[in-house]
C-alpha cells in the first residue's frame, strides 16, 4: 500500500472591491468613491487620528455567521493602511473601518484620516427606497 493522496476542495471566500463600499446615513447612501472625490474637491489634508479616540460601540459590519466573519477578516487583512480613513461632516467614520481594525490589531496608536466639511450632493438612493 502506497501513500493515498487526498484532494480537499478549495474554499472560496468572496472578495469585495473598493468601488462596492458604501456609507449610509440618514436614509442616504454614498459610494466610497464619491466620498474620496469630495475629499479632493475640498482639498482636504490628512491628519493623524488617535485610535484611542474612535468610538468602538457601533457595529459597521454585518456578521450573521462565520462566513460573514471570514469575509470581513479577509477585508481587514487585505486593507491598505496608507489610505486615510474618511469621517463624515458629523465626525462619524464614513469609510475606513477595516483599516481602523487592522491598525488596532497591529498595535498602531494613530491612523491617517480626512474630515469632510460637507457631504457630497451626489448620493445614491437608499436600498430601502422604492
Image: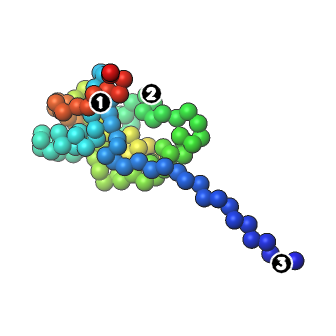
**Residue at image location 45% in from the left, 30% down from the top:** 59
Front of the two marks 2 and 1: 1
Report the number of numbered marks. 3
Q: Which residue is mark 1?
A: 29
Which one is in front, 47 or 14?
A: 14
Q: Residue furthest bottom?
A: 2
90 lies above or below 52:
above
Place of residue 96 in the rendered image (x, y in percent of width and height, measured from the top left): 34, 42
Q: Is residue 35 left or right of residue 81?
A: left
Question: x, y percentage for residue 11?
Answer: 59, 54
Location of the C terminus by quadrant is top left
Q: Residues within 10 Å of mark 3 (few under 14, many from 20)?
A: few
| Residue 95 - label | none
User: Element type at marker 1?
Assistant: strand
| Residue to which mark 3 is pinned | 2
Q: Which mark is residue 57?
A: 2
Which quarter of the picture shows residue 51? Answer: top left
Q: Is residue 54 left or right of residue 91?
A: right
Residue 67 seen in this snapshot: yes
Q: Give the farthest residue toward the front.
A: 130
Amino acid at each position: 500500500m502506497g501513500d493515498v493522496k487526498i484532494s480537499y476542495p478549495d474554499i472560496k471566500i468572496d472578495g469585495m472591491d473598493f468601488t462596492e463600499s458604501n456609507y449610509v446615513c440618514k436614509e442616504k447612501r454614498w459610494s466610497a468613491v464619491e466620498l474620496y472625490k469630495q475629499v479632493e474637491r475640498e482639498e482636504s489634508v490628512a491628519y493623524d487620528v488617535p485610535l484611542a479616540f474612535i468610538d468602538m460601540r457601533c457595529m459597521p459590519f454585518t456578521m450573521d455567521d462565520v462566513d460573514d466573519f471570514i469575509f470581513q477578516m479577509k477585508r481587514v487583512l487585505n486593507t491598505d493602511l496608507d489610505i486615510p480613513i474618511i469621517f463624515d461632516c458629523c465626525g462619524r467614520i464614513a469609510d475606513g473601518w477595516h483599516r481602523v481594525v487592522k491598525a488596532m490589531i497591529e498595535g498602531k496608536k494613530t491612523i491617517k484620516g480626512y474630515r469632510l466639511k460637507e457631504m457630497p450632493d451626489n448620493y445614491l438612493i437608499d436600498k430601502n427606497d422604492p
